[in-house]
Each structure stands twice: as structure tokens, then as C-alpha cells.
């Protein structure tokens, strides 16, 4: 039976991938750093194996008899050569046949992005691969921006009036599962966006109407940095976020592609639907 190993298993996309794989006839295993804490996040029937990208002692057991790997680069691991490549080498040695890698929109155009380095290394290793290149996750709004929206009714981020083609991680996971289960996606790369591109003013208006309380968009970069600092977030992380939102402000995040719709045979989820489904996060 096909054995699939899911990394980033406790994260936004990994959790959804695991949950969708439950209805398929395959042997699924969640690669987790800490099986005890993962238990609280994953369904009780999900098999786990200890795995840490930075601990090579975990590799042999985790990759044992794995046919397919869903690969997520943890956001904190930026040194690809030291922190990701050893695991990829171990996957190759263990005979992993296909990697579905959660990359990022535009990875093919920016060689310095960690995701771009990973894509190139997988190709160099000669493992068959499918690259999923999603745009900005809707779920950032119920994780990193949750408290601002919930407590102060403020969507505070410096994206100006730029549009973003948000995608729901549930759609990314559905695409991932299709590319893991079905043949024919090897050697392909998909740019995954939602079906609409919205400014954060428009997003704030949708929040206001769905939650029934006023949510205001504040694009001030100074307030954003101050707020992030007050949450004790590391300065490099804050600067990366400013860079990402600046690129949205400059109009680089609004492209809409047909890939998600073609792979799902339906329209991608809208931000209105996402806010309705997750409304309890902000109330
Ligand atoms: N957010 C966006 O808008 C966006 C858009 C495009 C692409 N992406 C890319 O998507 C990826 C993140 O996906 P996500 O949001 O689903 O993940 P996430 O929610 O940030 O979760 C990260 C996962 O990595 C695991 N992890 C952390 N350090 C690890 C280590 N040393 N070894 C093994 N596992 C480790 C975490 O497990 P623990 O439970 O052990 O911490 C967790 O499961 C990033 O590469 C990001 O650049 C994000």
C-alpha cells in the first residue's frame, strides 16, 4: 500500500492534508517533532513518527518505506543547505519516489527565496516532484493577525491599497492530496491563488459585515512594526513580513491563476466563505 509521509503535520496546511488523506486508501504517517504535543492537534487515529529537519538521527525511521513525501519548509528554517538538504538527501537514500513540495507563488522568479533553493535541490537529486506555489494564506488572518482583529477590531499591516489573491489552506490541501494520490503530476508546478484579488480595505469590510462588528484596516508601517515588537516577535521575522506586505502594496500579489480551479474542478473558496467558517476565531 502507498505510504505517504506528511511533514509540517501540525501546521496550517499539513493538518488539512492529513485530515483529507484519511478518506483515501493509503498508509499515512505524520512526521512530528514532538509526538506528545502533536496528539492534541491531530486526530487520534493518525499515526505519527518523530522527525526533526535539524536532527539527522530521526531520518531513517521517518523515511522507512515511504513512497511519497509531502514537504513543508518550517518558516524558521532559512538555511536550506544546513537545515533542509540533509533530510532531502536521506529521503533520496531511503527511496522516496515522489515529493509534493509546498513552495510559494513566484518561487521560479526569485532564486534567493528558500523555496526556490529547495525546488532546485529536489530537481538536482532527481526525485520526481510536484511544486505547489500558493499565494498568501487566508489563514494568516486567524493566526498572526487574529488578536488585532479580535481585540481592537483592527487589520494592521502595511499593504497599502495593493490587492492580494488570497488562497484558503483547505484548497491548497485539497490540491496537495490530489497530486499525492493521482498519477500525472510529477514534474509539474502549480501556481495556486484564489479566484479574486482584494485590497485589505475590502477584506476589512467583509470582516465587518460577517462579524457584525467594525473592523478597520490600518496600513501604517510604523504602527505595524511597533505592534509586532510589542508581541516580542524577532526583528528578522518582522522585516520579512514588512517585505511581503510591501510587495503586496506595490501590486505584486494580485495575480490570479486558473490552476486551483482546474485542479479542484470547482471555484476556490472565497474570503467571505473563509471568514464565515472561521468567525469564532475573532469573536
Ligand atoms: N503563510 C503564507 O501566506 C504562505 C504563503 C505561501 C507559502 N507559505 C509557506 O508555507 C510554509 C508553512 O506552511 P504552514 O503555514 O502550513 O506551516 P506552519 O503552520 O507555519 O507550521 C510549521 C510546521 O513545521 C513544523 N516544524 C517546525 N520546525 C520543525 C523542524 N525543525 N523539524 C520538523 N518540523 C518542524 C511545525 O511543527 P511543530 O508542531 O513541531 O512546531 C509545524 O508543523 C512555509 O514554507 C511558508 O513559507 C506560506
Image (spheres, helix red, strand yellow):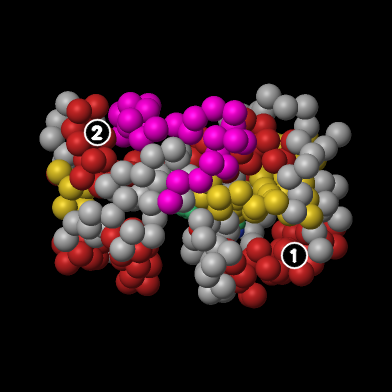
Label 1 CB sits under 8 Å from any ligand 1 atom? no
In this rendering, position of residue 38 left or right of residue 155: right
Q: Quadrant for the N terminus, please.
A: top right
Mark 2 element type? helix
Q: Is residue 209 above or below residue 75?
A: above
Q: Residue at x 35, y 67 (%)?
A: 243
Q: Residue at x 67, y 28 (%)?
A: 22
Q: Where is residue 28 drawn, in percent x and y?
A: 73, 37
Label 2 CB sits under 8 Å from any ligand 1 atom? no
Residue 280 painted magenta: yes
Q: Is residue 75 above or below residue 14?
A: below
Label 2, on which residue?
206
The disc at residue 223 is none
Q: Quadrant for the C terminus, please.
A: top left
Q: Residue at x 20, y 36 (%)?
A: 205
Other residues around mark 1 within 10 Å, as few (<14) / some (14–19) / many (≥20): few
Other residues around mark 2 within 10 Å, as few (<14) / some (14–19) / many (≥20): some
Q: Is residue 129 above or below residue 192?
A: below
Q: Mark 1 or mark 2: which comes first in sequence?
A: 1
In this rendering, position of residue 92 left or right of residue 74: right
Cα distance between the residues tagged 1 and 2: 41 Å
Residue 130 painted magenta: no
The magenta region covers 255-281
In this rendering, position of residue 158 left or right of residue 97: left
Note whether residue 233 is visible: no
Q: Between 54 and 201, which is closer to the camera in this rendering? A: 201
Label 1, on which residue?
123
Q: Residue at x 33, y 30 (%)?
A: 272
Amino acid at each position: 500500500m502507498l505510504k505517504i509521509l506528511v511533514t509540517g503535520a501540525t501546521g496550517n496546511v499539513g493538518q488539512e492534508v492529513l485530515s483529507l488523506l484519511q478518506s483515501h486508501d493509503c498508509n499515512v504517517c505524520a512526521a512530528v517533532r514532538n509526538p506528545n504535543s502533536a496528539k492534541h492537534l491531530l486526530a487520534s487515529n493518525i499515526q505519527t513518527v518523530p522527525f526533526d529537519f535539524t536532527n539527522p538521527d530521526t531520518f531513517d525511521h521517518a523515511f522507512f518505506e515511504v513512497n511519497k513525501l509531502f514537504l513543508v519548509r518550517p518558516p524558521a528554517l532559512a538555511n536550506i543547505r544546513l537545515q533542509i538538504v540533509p533530510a532531502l538527501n536521506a529521503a533520496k537514500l531511503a527511496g522516496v519516489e515522489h515529493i509534493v513540495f509546498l513552495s510559494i507563488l513566484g518561487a521560479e522568479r526569485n532564486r534567493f527565496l528558500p523555496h526556490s533553493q529547495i525546488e532546485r535541490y529536489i530537481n538536482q537529486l532527481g526525485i520526481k516532484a510536484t511544486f505547489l506555489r500558493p499565494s498568501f494564506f487566508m489563514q494568516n488572518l486567524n493566526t498572526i493577525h487574529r488578536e488585532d482583529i479580535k481585540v481592537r477590531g483592527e487589520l494592521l499591516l502595511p499593504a497599502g491599497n495593493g490587492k492580494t489573491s488570497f488562497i484558503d489552506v483547505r484548497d491548497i490541501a485539497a490540491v496537495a492530496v490530489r497530486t499525492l494520490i493521482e498519477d500525472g503530476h510529477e514534474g509539474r508546478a502549480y501556481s495556486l491563488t484564489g479566484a479574486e484579488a482584494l485590497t485589505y480595505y475590502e477584506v476589512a469590510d467583509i470582516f465587518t459585515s460577517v462579524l457584525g462588528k467594525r473592523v478597520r484596516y490600518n496600513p501604517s508601517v510604523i504602527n505595524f512594526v511597533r505592534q509586532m515588537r510589542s508581541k516580542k516577535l524577532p526583528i528578522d521575522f518582522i522585516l520579512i513580513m514588512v517585505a511581503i506586505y510591501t510587495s503586496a502594496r506595490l501590486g505584486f500579489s494580485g495575480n490570479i491563476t486558473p490552476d486551483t480551479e482546474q485542479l479542484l474542478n470547482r471555484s476556490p473558496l472565497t474570503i467571505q466563505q473563509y471568514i464565515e467558517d472561521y468567525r469564532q476565531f475573532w469573536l
